[in-house]
Image (spheres, rainbow, N blue to C red):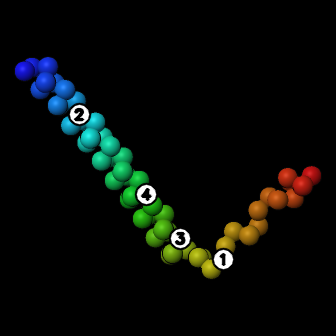
Amino acid sequence: MWIEGHWFSKDLLGQLILIWLVGICIVAVIVWRLRWKSGPSKRAPATRPKRRSRR
């Protein structure tokens, strides 16, 4: 009985951590998208160090 209870609590903790990670990821994506929208979305970063790779 005790072992089963411990396992269940461990599973719950793991699920909580997973949910937390997913939530943080979603929030980060939303914030990133909002920042991109607020910033110069039309001005794409075309200036990339491609000449260095050609060298």
* Residue nearest the observer in this picture, 18 or 37: 18
Q: Nearer the viewer, mark 3 or mark 2?
A: 2
Q: Amino acid at mark 2?
A: Asp
Residue 36's disc number: 3
The residue where tag 1 is placed is 43
The residue where tag 4 is placed is 28
Disc 3 secondary structure class:
helix
The residue where tag 2 is placed is 11
Specify few, some or many for label 2: CA neighbours under 10 Å numbering under 14, 14-19, or 20 or more. few
The residue at 46%/70% (across/down) is 34
Disc 4 secondary structure class:
helix
CA gap between label 1 and label 2 equals 47 Å
Dot 4 or dot 2, earlier in sequence? 2
Contact between marks 4 and 1 (CB within 8 A): the answer is no
Q: Amino acid at mark 1?
A: Arg
Dot 3 or dot 1, earlier in sequence? 3
CA gap between label 4 and label 1 equals 22 Å
